[in-house]
Amino acid sequence: MSFFEVENLSVSYGHISALRDVSVRVEEGMIVSIIGSNGAGKSTLMNAISGVVKRESGTLCLEGKALPGQAHRVVHSGIIQVPEGRRVFAGLTVTENLIMGGCRIPAAEARKKIPGMYDLFPILGQRKNQMAGTLSGGEQQMLAIARGLIAEPKILLLDEPSLGLAPIIVSQVFEIVKQINEQGITVLLVEQNASKAMAISDYTYVLETGRIVAEGSSDKLRNDDTIKKAYLGK
């Protein structure tokens, strides 16, 4: 059994099928990426895992234990999502945002972890008393990731971390994801920038119109002519 498993997950919005029998496996310590075009169902998959979107059918297991559908129980099990669009608390300072991230641990413990976040993201330390809504897009993305890390995730879900960022900032964000993984955190990464995602991930799933249409080691898929043509612009 894998560290984290999604089995035959289906989600519908009314009469519209968004995901159909999607299965994903993530081994501990890996970065697994899910790529696909706009509307493929990538964010729906992340939100269904997190409990934000109701599952029509399917099961989720973490460390061999079935996960409930309620979002707060998913979070307390150790699955932490960094949502698409960052969604920082604009009217709170950087430090206050980080404290809010410590929902799985006592507030005092969350505060103790903040200096480590400032070591990982020095710019956040420089901005610690600044309102999050006044940060640049890249700084907000770093804050959103740091806020997720405060919660001590067993698996970190990253939903489109490069969205809307300048190319140089995109490269920085992906380097940070690698650093996080090297510290032992398992990552499930949803990303439209297939080239960047596959460059840092161990394994990749390709999602199209709500179904997994291909999967394999990221190195193998990067050299697949069909994948290169469809997702890498080659």
Image: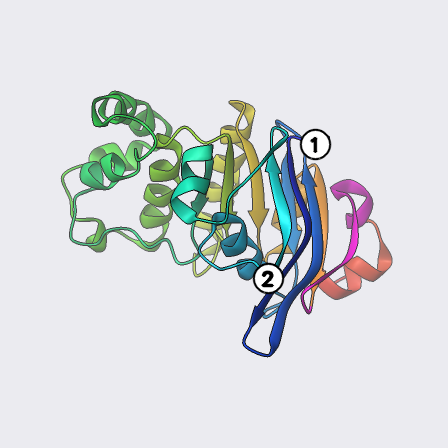
Which residue corresponds to the image point at 25% horizontal and 39% vertical from the top-left? 100
Residue 150 percent location from the top left of the image:
34, 31
For the residue marked with disc 1, what is the amino acid? Answer: Ser
Instruction: Out of 220 and 68, give the one closest to the viewer.
Output: 68
- Reading the image, the residue beneath label 2 is 56
**Is 227 left or right of 184, judged from the image as shown?**
right
Q: Of all residues shown, which one is farthest toward the right?
A: 225
Instruction: Out of 57 and 45, give the one closest to the viewer.
Output: 57
Can you see residue 162?
yes
Q: Is residue 222 above or below residue 207?
A: above
Q: Quadrant of the N terminus?
A: top right
For the residue marked with disc 2, what is the amino acid? Answer: Glu
Find the magenta span and give its range.
209-222
Q: For residue 90, which quarter of the picture?
A: bottom left
- Reading the image, the residue beneath label 1 is 2
Residue 121 percent location from the top left of the image:
34, 33
Residue 86 percent location from the top left of the image:
37, 53
Mark linked to residue 84: none
Can you see residue 232?
no
**Is 6 left or right of 141, judged from the image as shown?**
right
**Number of disc labels:** 2
The local crowd at label 2, few if under 14, some if 14 to 19, many if 20 or more residues have their Cα within 10 Å, is some
Which residue corresponds to the image point at 71% horizontal and 46% vertical from the top-left? 204
Instruction: Out of 59 and 193, give the one closest to the viewer.
Output: 59
Q: CA distance from mark 2 to mark 1?
A: 23 Å
SS at badge 2: loop
Q: Is residue 11 above or below residue 24?
A: below
